[in-house]
Image: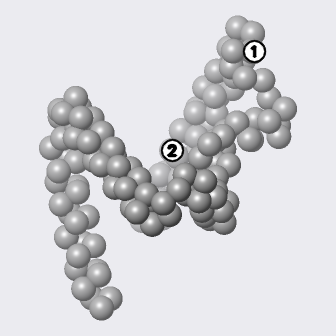
Amino acid sequence: MINLYNTVYKFFDKLEDRVRGKLTHYPIIYAFIGSIGIVSIWRGIWHISDDLFLSGPASLLIGVVLTLQIGLFISFFIGDNIIISGIKQEKRIDEKTENEIREEKNILVEMQKDLLEIKKYIKDSKDTIK
């Protein structure tokens, strides 16, 4: 059973890589096909939910309980970034001044320089070891 799963998984993984590789050259077509797929998934879930639960309140209750149990409810509807920024008591970008945004940009540029230096150091260290 596991071999069958691995075979099917590898087949679709390679197929996905080929299709995605070709579609990236045509972003509008890629977006259109992707949107059809996503809407079709949600439409199918909607119909199954209607057939199984027969009522909006029951579907809502099952959906809320399910997403709360697997940890997706809050992160999906609010988003991790909003929660983290609230905990850190950070301002939203529309509340920041131009100077604060420039300061953050400068910090990010410095961090990027540091990362490049670390990357170069690691590469040089690997070359020395060889």
Per the image, label 1 sits on a secondary structure element best described as helix
Q: Amino acid at mark 1?
A: Glu
Q: Is residue 92 above or below residue 51?
A: above
Q: Position of residue 38 (x, y in %)?
A: 34, 46
Residue appearing at x 70%, y 8% in the figure: 98
Q: CB of mark 1 within 8 Å of CB of mark 2?
A: no
Per the image, label 2 sits on a secondary structure element best described as helix
Q: Position of residue 58 (x, y in %)?
A: 59, 59
Q: Quadrant of residue 52?
A: bottom left
Which of 48 and 88 lies nearest the eye of the viewer?
Answer: 48
Tell whether 90 sits left or right of 94. right
Which of 118 and 52 lies nearest the eye of the viewer?
Answer: 52
Q: Position of residue 61 (x, y in %)?
A: 63, 58
Measured in 3D between alpha carbons, the distance from the residue under mark 1 to the one under mark 2, in whole angstroms, is: 37 Å
Q: Which residue is mark 2?
A: 120
Q: Which residue is mark 1?
A: 95
Q: Is residue 105 above or below residue 43?
A: above
